[in-house]
Amino acid sequence: MHLTNEYEGMLAETISLAGHNGDQINAYFARPLGPGPFPGIVLVHHMPGWDEWYREATRKFATHGYAALCPNLYARNGHGTPEDVAAAVRAAGGIPDKQAVGDIAGALQTLRALPVLNGKAGIFGTCSGGRHAFLAACLNPGFDALVDCWGGRVVMAAEDLSPNQPVSPLDYTKDLPCPILGIFGEEDQNPTPEQVARLEQELKQLGKTYEFYMYPGAGHGFFYHERPMYRQEQAVEGWKQVFAFLEKYLQS
């Protein structure tokens, strides 16, 4: 909640951090000015790349009182426009899951070293970033909440596996240590509603804490306001669920 007589300021900048195998990668960091303490959030970008939408989302989280960090998972694939770098990654069959999880672990470690952190840290990802966020939450101890927005290929058939993606993230569900929020569109084909139902079934069977929201009239990427798939009504409601969920688990 914002009050009209409050001072508001923000620090936002590109930084460097140690990712997988100690590799230096760049990241976008934003936090409110002031002593804190603030909850932390790692943002995991999508296949369109480390782009303007993710910079805006990082600042959006900072506006809502978070120390927010978005690592560039494609840093090893060269530099240029996000579109050109993402095209090179796509042509290479994506990045290795192990590398993405290692980079996210480095981002989490960077956040947890901040003296302004309140001791809590969550993770947020959309599209392929939702998949990587799910993997990272299962394999990296230390996340207190997970937000998966339409993460595709969390549920994978044997024929979908590859050297870069050798294990279906669904198989790691038993290791998920924190609550998960899922935001999905009924018209999405990756993940399909059937795949979302399969993930929900696994979470329920394993006794995990979860909240899933499936929005009618929305497909893949319906938060992306600069793209034709944007659905204003569903996106506004979805963002409300994101911040309500994170407030419950990270701001207490």
Image: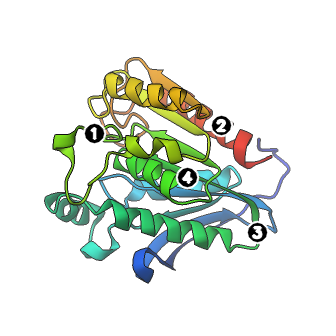
Residue 123 is labelled as 4
| Residue 190 left/right relative to 56 | left
Q: Amino acid at mark 2?
A: Phe
Q: Residues within 10 Å of mark 1 (few under 14, many from 20)?
A: some
Given residues 48 and 176, the one toward you in this image is 176
Give the residue displayed 27% in from the left and 62% down from the top. Answer: 95
For the point 33% across and 34% down, the residue is 220
As measured in the structure, the alpha-carbon distance from the residue carrying label 1 to the one carrying label 4 is 22 Å
Q: Which residue is mark 3?
A: 116
Can residue 109 be seen in the rendering of this structure? yes
Residue at the (82%, 68%) spot, across then down:
35
Left or right: residue 223 versus residue 228 is: right
Residue marked by disc 2? 245
Report the amino acid beneath label 4: Ile
- Expressed as whole percent of the image width and height from the top left, the position of residue 9 reads 72, 63
On-image quarter of the N terminus: top right
Callout 2–callout 1 Cβ contact below 8 Å: no
C-alpha span from label 4 to label 2: 12 Å
